[in-house]
């Protein structure tokens, strides 16, 4: 399928934004707040349970209007509909993009390529729920009759980051008798560390892989199977201790897992958009089917907001467009996500894949090189830890780092004296970043002249604050869907395919070529570049020395 669009950077809308950025040069957030006493109340929006304050961004009403014009020029409303309807917008793989169908309510229907995908989704959800309930109650036991209380998810990328992030996020909702472990890295140390002290008789392995060909996951799954069989001494144990999550029944059967113990999903779910599918089975076992469904309802509510709210008040659209503003018109290179909630410790890592694998692209949908910047580097850590590590650079470094601060009105546990202090830190940081401290204010504190420059805060560092009532399953779903649709908004403006990931392929191919060169008994004749050849030789020599010595 060939898609031809006008280069977005040659449109009048883009040019208008470029001119507007010139006009705004030198404007400080202090000026914007000084000129409009209501700004902190009006530059806000709500989506489901999330209150979003974007007033501390370097934008005016005019900026937002021009950005919305740009989104229209890029065809965003039409693209949103095309995605929800199941059109094959993933053009390089000729696939629909329907993660939104994963959380559609039971009574919805969506026929795509002749199939009611919502009915399929609920059929799998019901099977997952029945299985999860049996594991949780102890009705499903291991080979020797013991209850399975250690759940090991083996997967990588989207088959790991999502369920892991969410299992940590929803830990207060989890069954305390269940231990959730995630093994992803092909580094054997990951598996070895994970299985230390774990009782094979009580362990369930969930092998999660969309393709079931990912070398890391298959290698780890084989190691886990050997470990189990060594301990239990009976091949029949696999049926009770291994289940699979995949789109590839053939490969699952080839691996030796009965497809009766497989939970499926579909090629229209991208890996990084998949943890609300069967990929979330480990999460569902931990928190129970009801909490999982509450999370899906949160996702769905945000989907509805995204699909039906006018662009001007559409929160994922606004956040996406503000990101475009920084990336393309203010020259920023990174975007920080700073959750003030320890249970969201893996949220930035999850968003890294979601955003960077989706929008780390340099050609348009029709394969032409883009003439503008696309996805930023996404990174972050929970507050307040980050404050004592990298915030220095955000406050006083030489580059602008737009940041999302995510806070909650209520903590999971009301530990006296903590939550208000945590929230005060969030608010203090966004205030300090925006308004800084002038040299005059520093001097007024009695600071000696030679230190004034060092103690001055320029301010004007943009932030968005997302405030939610509490990190419930529903709110987690809302947050994830918010970022999914933000990424989609940006990918649409940039006219790139946010749903393929060809950039990961070359490294996989080369690793398959190098592996036998590292392990062959005979020195292989190496035809790589001189750096790679020398490293292979050095590694081989050192490995041989250590095994011979
Ligand atoms: O679920 P799978 O097929 O094992 O893939 C794992 C991950 O690998 C990738 O394809 C990248 O190599 C991701 O997009 C995906 O989430």
Image (cartoon, rainbow, N blue to C red):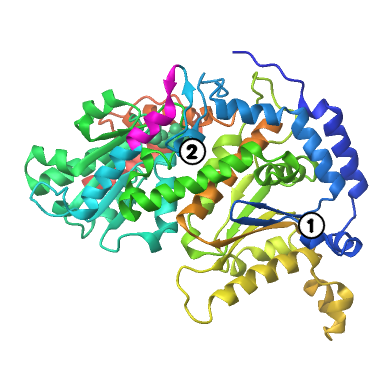
User: In the image, what residue occupies the spot 69% across and 31% down?
Assistant: 77
Q: Secondary structure at mark 2?
A: helix
The residue lying furthest to the bottom in this view is 446
User: In the image, what residue occupies the spot 39% across and 33% down?
Assistant: 121
Which mark is nearer the camera, 1 or 2? Answer: 1
Question: Residue tagged by mark 1?
Answer: 42
Q: Is residue 243 left or right of residue 156?
A: left
Q: Is residue 280 above or below residue 146?
A: above
Whether 119 is among the magenta residues is yes
Residue 216, horizontal then vertical, whole percent: 34, 38
User: What number is the disc on residue 351?
Assistant: none
Can you tell me which quadrant of the image ligand 1 is in?
top left
Q: Secondary structure at mark 1?
A: helix
Residue 2, horizontal then vertical, whole percent: 63, 13
Whether residue 484 is visible here, answered yes or no, is no
Residue 456, horizontal then vertical, whole percent: 81, 71
Where on the picture, by quarter, is residue 16? top right
User: In the image, what residue occupies the spot 32% across and 54% down?
Assistant: 286
Quadrant containing the N terminus is: top right
Whether residue 179 is visible here, answered yes or no, is yes
| Magenta stretch bounds | 114-124
Q: Earlier in the sequence, mark 1 or mark 2?
A: 1
Q: Is residue 410 above or below residue 94?
A: below
Front residue of 515 and 239:
239
The residue lying furthest to the top in this view is 1
* Marks 1/2: CA–CA distance: 32 Å
Question: Residue tagged by mark 2?
Answer: 273
Q: Please identify the dominant SS of the magenta region.
A: helix
Crowding near the residue tagged with mark 2, few <14, some 14–19, many ≥20 C-alpha atoms within 10 Å: many
């Amino acid at each position: 399928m060939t898609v031809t669009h006008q280069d977005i950077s040659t449109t009048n809308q883009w040019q208008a934004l470029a001119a507007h950025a010139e006009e705004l040069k030198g404007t400080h957030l202090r000026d914007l707040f000084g000129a409009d006493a209501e700004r902190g109340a009006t530059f806000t929006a709500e989506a489901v349970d999330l209150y979003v304050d974007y007033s501390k961004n370097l934008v005016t009403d005019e900026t937002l209007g021009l950005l919305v014009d740009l989104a229209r020029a890029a065809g965003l409303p039409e693209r949103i509909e095309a995605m929800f309807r199941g059109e094959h917008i993933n053009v390089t793989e000729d696939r629909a993009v329907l993660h939104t169908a994963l959380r559609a309510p039971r009574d919805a229907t969506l026929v795509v390529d002749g199939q009611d995908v919502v009915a399929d989704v609920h059929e799998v959800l019901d099977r997952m729920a029945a299985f999860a309930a049996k594991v949780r109650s102890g009705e499903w036991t291991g080979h020797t009759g013991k209850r399975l209380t250690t759940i090991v998810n083996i997967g990588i990328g989207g088959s790991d980051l999502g369920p892991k992030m969410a299992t940590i996020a929803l830990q207060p909702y989890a069954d305390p008798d269940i231990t959730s472990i995630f093994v992803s890295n092909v580094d054997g140390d990951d598996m070895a560390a994970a299985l230390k002290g774990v009782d094979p008789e009580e362990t369930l392995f969930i092998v999660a892989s969309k393709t079931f060909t990912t070398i890391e996951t298959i290698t780890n799954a084989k190691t886990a199977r050997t470990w189990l069989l060594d301990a239990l001494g009976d091949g029949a144990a696999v049926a009770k201790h291994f289940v699979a999550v995949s789109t590839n029944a053939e490969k699952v059967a080839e691996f030796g897992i009965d497809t009766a113990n497989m939970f499926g999903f579909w090629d229209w779910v991208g890996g990084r958009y998949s943890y609300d599918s069967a990929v979330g089975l480990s999460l569902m076992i931990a928190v129970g089917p009801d909490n999982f469904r509450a999370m899906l309802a949160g996702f769905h509510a945000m989907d509805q907001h995204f699909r039906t709210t006018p662009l001007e008040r559409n929160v994922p659209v606004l956040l996406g467009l503000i990101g475009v503003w920084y990336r393309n018109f203010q020259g920023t290179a990174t975007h920080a996500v700073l959750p003030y909630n320890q249970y969201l410790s893996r949220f930035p890592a999850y968003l890294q894949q979601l955003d960077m694998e989706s929008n780390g692209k340099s050609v348009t949908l029709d394969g032409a090189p883009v003439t503008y910047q696309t996805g930023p580097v996404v990174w972050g850590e929970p507050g307040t830890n980050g404050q004592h590590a990298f915030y220095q650079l955000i406050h006083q470094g030489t580059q602008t780092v737009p940041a999302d601060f995510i806070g909650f009105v209520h903590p999971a546990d009301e530990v006296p004296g903590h939550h208000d202090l945590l929230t005060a830190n969030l608010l203090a940081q966004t205030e300090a970043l925006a308004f800084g401290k002038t040299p005059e204010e520093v001097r007024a504190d009695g600071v000696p002249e030679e230190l004034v420059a060092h103690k001055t805060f320029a301010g004007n560092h943009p932030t968005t604050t997302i405030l939610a009532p509490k990190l419930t399953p529903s709110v987690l779903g809302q947050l994830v869907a918010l970022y999914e649709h933000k990424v989609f908004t940006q990918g649409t403006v940039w006219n790139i395919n946010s749903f393929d990931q060809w950039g990961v392929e070359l490294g996989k191919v080369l690793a398959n070529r190098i592996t036998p060169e590292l392990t062959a008994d005979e020195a292989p004749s190496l035809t790589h570049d001189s750096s790679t050849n020398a490293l292979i030789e050095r590694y081989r020599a050192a490995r041989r020395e250590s095994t011979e010595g």
